[in-house]
Amino acid sequence: MDTIAAIATPPGRGAISMVRVSGPHALQIGERVFKGRKRIRDFPPGTFHHGFILDPDTGRKLDEVVVLVYHAPHSFTGEDMLEITTHGGLIPARRVLRALIKAGARMAEPGEFTRRAMLNGKMDLIQAESLLDLIDAKTEACADVALKNLTGELSERIKKIREKLLEVSMELELSLDFTDQDLIFPSHEKIKKTLEELSQEIKEMIERWNRGRMLMEGMRIVITGKPNVGKSTLFNALLSEEKAIVTEEPGTTRDVLEGWIEIEGFPVKVFDTAGLRPAEGKVEKIGIERAKRVLESADLVLFVVDGSQELSQEDMEIYEEIKEKQHLIIINKCDLGCRIKEFPGGLRISALTHEGMERLHEEIKKLLNPEELGDILITHERHYNALRTALQYIEEAEKGVEEGRGEELIAEDVKFARETLSSLVGEITSEEILDEIFSNFCIGK
């Protein structure tokens, strides 16, 4: 296997930067460029050493550094590894990296350090994905869930389900192998009960998928309604900043605006959209088309009407478009009086004076249900799809027991369920899937 190197810190001005080297020849390559009081091969593992990085061709000093040494398998990647701390800024780390590549290292691919850690048994695939979740965490709650999965809680739960499936498989196989002998095996009723318990456990994990997705990606709230009902004023009130232009002229918002807020630990992405009406120009038409596309992916729609005016046919036509989605009806401009009798359950607010905004936050909070953040959450669509597939196989095995199918058919479904869970933790995974997952990492991770 090649020895790889990469800059592990973001570019820009700072106190220090860090270059990583990992692989079978990491120590030898390090010695070709490092000059200190001792040779790298003589460094005790886990110790820091001061020195200089030299150009391996000319011997010219490139930077003053501190080197930290790890010996396999006691490193992040499970290989021999160096972490070279350079001075900060754009140039020093780049010069050190070029020297290492001249000395025999190869530039790392995105996520290759973490990929090697997984391949060397330092973590499984779920933990690798959780590491990226932790890096990308937008809130403290996101970081808590990512860290819980990184430390293996989700993986352990899935592995325990797989172990119970393995026990069922062994019971079925034994029953097949010794059908002609007078031996007592667990009843089909016991096998069915085990399968029912496992399917229920997986269902509970699947049901929390949407919460895990919203936690990591952000809940998508889309504000919609006809022009001039106060959508942009509401958008600004939610963000607590004047991000959208607000005028009395209908159709001021021509494009989709977006901003981030945090509610009870959840990142929330709020979209302000163009008023839905027959477009009066090319630009407005494009804005309305974009608004409709954003509406399709909304987790929650805030349907805004002007409470100071009677409900119009235009309002009702828009409501018909969004009523099947999860939505809240916002009766805005209530500081001017409320003339709307329809929608008795609508939230009466004034986005201008912030009257009723606290109640709106409470309603959004109910949908997020932050009390369940302590549970183990799946946070990737890959997890969701794999669990759904495993559940289908387990339910088919349950059905097979109920219908009295042969043990070999039931055992086949249980086997497929086990293999699906093995692919989830990365024990059986194609190179294409690994390439896709690790391409999302930065080069030095």
Image: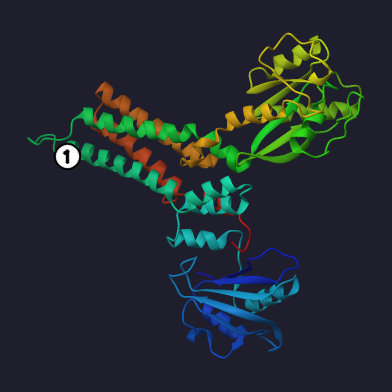
* Near-viewer residue (408 or 91): 91
Q: In the image, 348: left or right of 427?
A: right
Question: Which residue is outermost to the bottom?
Answer: 37
Residue 442 drawn at (x, y percent): 63, 58
Query: What residue is disc 1 on?
Result: 177
Q: Is residue 19 visible?
A: yes
Q: Is residue 333 visible?
A: no
Residue 19 drawn at (x, y percent): 62, 71
Residue 260 drawn at (x, y percent): 71, 41
The residue drawn where x is 55% and y is 36% is 370
For label 1, count other residues whose C-alpha is less than 10 Å away and answer few (under 14), some (14-19) or many (20+). few
* Near-viewer residue (115 or 205): 205
The residue drawn where x is 54% and y is 39% is 212
Q: In the figure, residue 173 lies in which quadrant?
A: top left
Up the image or down, 431 lies above or below 265; here it is below
Quadrant of the drawing holding the C terminus: bottom right
Q: In the figure, residue 365 lies in which quadrant?
A: top right
The residue drawn where x is 68% and y is 72% is 16
